[in-house]
C-alpha cells in the first residue's frame, strides 16, 4: 500500500490513540503536524486525527479499528 498520512499535533491524546490502533495493525503512517503549516491547521484543527490515503480519501476522528480496515479496503 502507498504511504498513508496521519494529520495531527504534538500532545494530541486522540492522535496518540489513533497511532496505537494503526500500529497494532502494522500500519505506520507518515505523521504530519498540522501546527507547522497554516493551511493544514485551518483545514484540520477541529477534526484531528485524520488518516489520509494517497488517492485523497480521508478518515476523520472518531474512528475505530473496523472503520480503519474498511477505509483501507475501499
Image (cartoon, grey):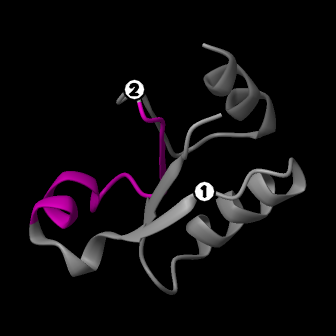
Question: Residue 63 location in percent, x, y?
Answer: 63, 40
User: Which residue extends farthest bottom?
Assistant: 11
- In the rendered image, the vertical position of residue 20 relative to residue 21, given as above or below: below
Q: Secondary structure at mark 1?
A: loop
> Which residue appears at 69% of the width and 34% of the height?
68
Question: Residue 37 location in percent, x, y?
Answer: 17, 73
How many residues crowd mark 2 within 10 Å: few (<14), some (14–19), many (20+)? few
Choose top left, top right, bottom left or bottom right for residue 23. bottom right
> Which residue appears at 51% of the width and 77% of the height?
12
Q: Which residues are magenta?
A: 39-54
* Quadrant in which the C terminus is drawn: top right
N-terminal of the two: label 1 or label 2?
1
Is 23 left or right of 45, judged from the image as shown? Answer: right
Is 22 left or right of 57, judged from the image as shown? Answer: right
Tell me the residue that label 1 is attached to.
Answer: 29
Question: Residue 52 location in percent, x, y?
Answer: 45, 41
> Which residue appears at 43% of the width and 35% of the height?
54
Residue 42 is tagged as none
Is 9 left or right of 3, judged from the image as shown? Answer: left
Q: Secondary structure at mark 2?
A: loop
Q: Is residue 14 magenta?
A: no
Of 54 and 63, which appears nearest the observer?
A: 54
Of 49 and 29, which appears nearest the observer?
A: 29
How many residues crowd mark 1 within 10 Å: few (<14), some (14–19), many (20+)? some
- In the rendered image, the vertical position of residue 25 relative to residue 37, given as above or below: above
| Inter-mark Cα distance, 1 to 2 | 15 Å
- In the rendered image, the vertical position of residue 49 relative to residue 35, given as above or below: above
> Which residue appears at 60% of the width and 75% of the height?
13
Amino acid at each position: 500500500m502507498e504511504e498513508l498520512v496521519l494529520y495531527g499535533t504534538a500532545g494530541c491524546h486522540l492522535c496518540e490513540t489513533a497511532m496505537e490502533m494503526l500500529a497494532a495493525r502494522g500500519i505506520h503512517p507518515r505523521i504530519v503536524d498540522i501546527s507547522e503549516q497554516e493551511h493544514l491547521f485551518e483545514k484540520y484543527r477541529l477534526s484531528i486525527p485524520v488518516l489520509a490515503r494517497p488517492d485523497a480519501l480521508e478518515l476523520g476522528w472518531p474512528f475505530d479499528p473496523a472503520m480503519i480496515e474498511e477505509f483501507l479496503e475501499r
